[in-house]
Image: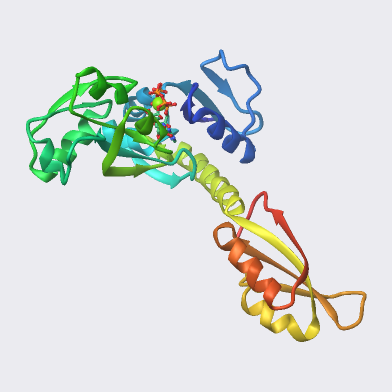
Amino acid sequence: MSKLRIAVQKSGRLNEDSMKLLKDIGISIDNGKDQLKASAKGFPVEVFYLRNGDIPQYLKDGVVDAAIIGENVLIEKGEGIGVVEKLGFSTCRVCIAVPKAMVYSSIKDLEGKRIATSYPNTVQMYLDRKGVNANLHIINGSVEIAPNIGLADAICDIVSSGSTLFKNNLKEVDTILKSEAVLAVSPKLDSDRLAILEKIQFRIQSVLKGRNSKYVLLNAPNDKVQDIINVLPGMKSPTVLPLAEEGWSSIHSVISKNEFWEVIDDLKAKGAQGILVCPIEKMVL
Ligand SMILES: Nc1ncnc2c1ncn2[C@@H]1O[C@H](COP(=O)(O)OP(=O)(O)OP(=O)(O)O)[C@@H](O)[C@H]1O
Ligand SMILES: O=P(O)(O)OC[C@H]1O[C@H](OP(=O)(O)OP(=O)(O)O)[C@H](O)[C@@H]1O
Ligand SMILES: [Mg+2]
């Protein structure tokens, strides 16, 4: 029987969240990290532990069928590789940054200048689109140091909190792209493995919907129930159950994590009491 071969980053920023997601969808692997390949228990999946930067080539060659990888790496060197799911972690952006003291009004100011980067294709595509000629210096890490040691006039690298730029006296001046971890798929995926991938995708969607939602329970006097229901959409519609105390109801619903605080304020203002908010492990609509 075929197994779906999934690549995850061996170590680094994506590893922990990738392994957590696999665990949450019921794919548990109990080998130590030293192994480069491991089989999951009870599901036809093999996990390959690889360098993030090497994964696009493995996908292109069909050596692995799917991967959890930073979208930015696919844009850099993942031509022809499809993305089937955005995973909501390792969010960052690929930016142009220059020394704080430099006067910068647009990318045209980098005409003829030197840009240090680990993402040469991404930068080149951006420069071509803007009609700017610049010289790229490819470095694999610690790119932010380049302007300070006279190696470049500007850099292009990943930014998240912005603290690495700040510490190196640089300012972010242009965002080329935004990125997060994604589930990517090999163009050579066969139909047996596609069926396994679809099961995995369904499970991932259930987990991500759960992570993005909260289960809310609250009590309210019966004459407030309708007002409260109006601010609680629920999956189909909220559940309303009578409390043991006459004239009171318990209302249960699901709300989005993003609008959670505003909804809670609204519920309190409308007379809700004893509000409980619980995490949701999985959500199947
Ligand atoms: N500061 C950050 N905040 C959030 N996400 C980040 C950050 N830096 C990198 N990432 C994301 O995590 C991915 C992995 O980054 P990491 O630095 O762990 O590995 P790498 O050195 O790029 O790759 P490799 O596994 O090949 O050594 C990046 O491709 C990017 O998508
Ligand atoms: O905006 P910030 O939150 O400061 O994050 C940005 C930094 O994070 C990444 O480096 P990482 O720590 O992964 O080191 P690396 O260059 O060795 O990959 C990236 O290359 C930046 O240097
Ligand atoms: Mg890094």
Q: Quadrant of ligand 1?
A: top left
Q: Quadrant of residue 112?
A: top left
Q: Which residue is drawn at 34% across and 44% down?
A: 178
Q: Where is residue 187 in the image (x, y as percent from the top left)?
A: 33, 36
Q: In which quarter of the image is residue 23?
A: top right
For the question of whether residue 80 can be seen, the reply is no
In the rendered image, the vertical position of residue 144 relative to residue 239, given as above or below: above
Q: Nearer the viewer, residue 122 or 268?
A: 268
Q: Which residue is drawn at 87% across and 74% down?
A: 243
Q: Residue furthest top?
A: 34
For the question of whether residue 181 can be seen, the reply is yes
Q: Position of residue 3 (x, y in %)?
A: 52, 30
Q: Residue at x 23, y 24 (%)?
A: 147
Quadrant placement of the N terminus = top right
In the rendered image, the vertical position of residue 182 relative to residue 210, given as above or below: above
Quadrant placement of the C terminus = bottom right
Q: Where is residue 106 in the image (x, y as percent from the top left)?
A: 15, 45
Q: Nearer the viewer, residue 263 or 55?
A: 263
Q: Is residue 76 left or right of residue 51?
A: left
Colour scheme of the picture: rainbow
Q: Is residue 56 left or right of residue 105?
A: right
Q: Is residue 50 left or right of residue 135?
A: right
Q: Residue at x 57, y 54 (%)?
A: 212
Q: Position of residue 77 (x, y in %)?
A: 27, 31
